[in-house]
Image (tube, rainbow, N blue to C red):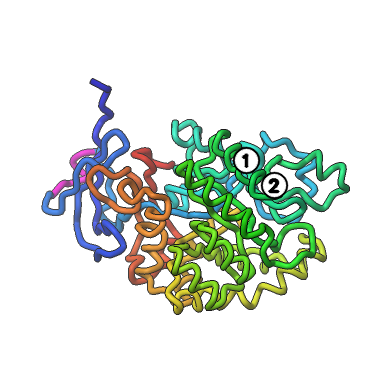
Amino acid sequence: MPKQDPITVIVAGQLITDAQSNAGGPAVIRVQNGKILSISRDEMLDPASDPAIVDLSNKTVMPGLIDLHVHLTGDPGGDFWKEATEPAEWGVVVGAKNAQLTAKAGFTTVREAGSSKYSAFSLRRGTAEGKISGPRIIAAGPALAIVGGHGDTTGFTEDINDALASGYSCTGPVQCAEKVRKASRAGADIIKITATGGVLSQQGRGLEAHFSDAEMKSIADTAHSLGLNVMAHAHGARGIEAAAKAGIDTIEHGTYLDKQAADAMKANGTILVPTLMAFKGVTERLGKGIYTPVVEDKVRAVSETAKVFMRKAHGWGVPIAFGTDAGVFDHGRNAGEFALMVEQGLTPREAVASATTVAAKVLDMENEIGKIAVGFSADLIAVSGNPLDDVTVLENVDWVMVRGRVID
């Protein structure tokens, strides 16, 4: 028989098992081998009598949070030239720091939405094996982009651009299908594409569609044939619409979403990941000499739309899941997204669900994470207060367990 870990006993003052349930308690949770072994609401334990008990009797215990859009291997800034001076391996060092910050902030699972070379794959293994303190990582690796588009290397002379390129830009349906297969072979858990122009890339192109319809459909069909979903960075409405019609699974950002694009998303089951903290983060850095003039102009152009687009999407019935684009702003501030979502129309309960049950379903992991239930991964956090009443309590997480391991 495989060796059994000791049982961890957690006493919770209040327990939220999932976003659809109200807080109730007290409760006792037993954890073993990284899984939830049992949950009892009628058992009375005295933490003072047993030092092995984790005493959270004055806290609310709830499922660990899920962020569907992070960049662990990078920190915020406008110094794009570092791509020419820092080796890809440095991303693992930066990522280890940020993985711990992210977990301590209460995020027990993240989707890494594009990393330097294969650094996120090393982080994924490190947190899975407990060698690095951090969340479960669903990793994309390098993003697929058009030549010279957002996600490709730009801003240098052509010879330097070519030398720094990740090898994942593509032209035409056949080559794009090949790059999906290459990403799968390298170990990607999900395919990331930049379906439209972007705000922080070093070129002044617009924010509409980059890939052709045929290229995007080839990417989606190839990924799905391999059992992989596709996440698409997309700002412009027609690019969002085209991505949804091509079968892309999630739209990241969605800044200029309109009713026509929203209808296409609903018709195709496409999820919006709004990353409101990204817009907040970049506007905080305006006028400080951090970004190039080209990037500053693009930030200013999207700043007002970013304050209202998710409210429109919600009103049109577009399904919304939680993601922040951490790395564009400081890692560890991820939970600031909740208040921004509530400001744009979500209830606190809907906001919490977006980062638990809804996000788990986006990852096809709804039977493993996103709830506190017997047999689920022991991904738990503790806070003071009730986030179903006030989401801002999630900005101060007191205790975290990821896969049965307490994050110190």
In the image, 110: left or right of 218? Answer: left
**Residue 94 visible:** no
Q: What's the amino acid at mark 2?
A: Cys
Give me the C-alpha separation between circle 2 and circle 1. Answer: 9 Å
- Seen from the viewer's position, the closer of residues 390 and 225 is 225
Q: Earlier in the sequence, mark 2 or mark 1?
A: 2
Q: Position of residue 390 (x, y in %)?
A: 38, 70
Q: Position of residue 12 (x, y in %)?
A: 25, 53
Q: Which residue is mark 2?
A: 170
Whether label 2 touches label 1, CB < 8 Å:
yes
Disc assigned to residue 178 = 1
Q: What's the amino acid at mark 1?
A: Glu
In the image, 147: left or right of 185? Answer: right
The residue at the point 38 percent across, 74 percent down is 347
- Seen from the viewer's position, the closer of residues 4 and 299 is 299
Disc assigned to residue 348 = none
Quadrant in which the N terminus is drawn? top left
